Amino acid sequence: MRTSLNVPEEMLAEFDRTWQAEGLDSRSRALREAIQEYVESHHQLERARGSVAATVVFDYVHEEVIEDLHEIQHEFQTEIDTTCHVHHGEWCLEAVFCHGSAAEIRELVYRLKDFDAVGRVSVTLLRADETAV
């Protein structure tokens, strides 16, 4: 199936350098692999059950979203143990260390992804209740 995407030129150039450095055959192959990784990450988060520990790392434009992020962090204060915040010009990088029900952690992740000013959200499940999966 053919499709088209709107991708910033800088991002596409970096993507091309990356897949070529890895020795892949084509941009299409690299995109298929990237899509597969995205789908697998989503399924891992969706399948998690019971109590989990996780890190949620995301970047965002500080001025556009900081108040909303503070509200979300207060809503999820039971699940959030601590955060680490670093400024890089107008962009910020934040790591959130949390534990709680998988359903609440999923909700936190999806709420963060819902902001246009948030660039990327990456989740690592550190521990899951294996008996409930």
Image: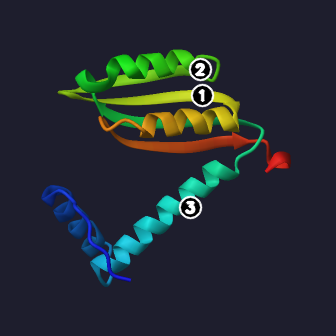
Kindly identify the residue that appears in the image at 31 percent across and 84 percent down. Answer: 25
Disc 1 versus disc 3: distance between alpha carbons? 21 Å
| Residue at disc 1, secondary structure | strand
Question: Can you identify the residue that label 2 sits on?
Answer: 81
Question: Can you identify the residue that label 3 sits on?
Answer: 40
Kindly identify the residue that appears in the image at 50 percent across and 20 percent down. Answer: 73
| Residue at disc 2, secondary structure | strand
Q: Amino acid at mark 1?
A: Cys
User: Which percent across, then down, holds residue 70?
Assistant: 43, 17
Q: Most extreme residue toward the left, as rendered?
A: 9
Q: Give yes or no for contact between labels 2 and 1 (Cβ–Cβ under 8 Å).
A: yes
Relative side of 49 to 16, left or right:
right
Tell me which label, 3 or 2, sits earlier in the chain. 3
- In which quarter of the view is residue 106 placed? top right
Could you classify mark 1 by the number of other residues whose Cα lies within 10 Å: few (under 14), some (14-19), or many (20 or more)? many
Kindly identify the residue that appears in the image at 45 percent across and 34 percent down. Answer: 112
Q: Nearer the viewer, residue 71 or 125?
A: 71
Q: Amino acid at mark 3?
A: Glu
Q: Work out whether residue 21 can be spotted.
A: yes
In the displayed structure, 17 sits above or below 86; it is below
In the displayed structure, 54 sits above or below 76; it is below
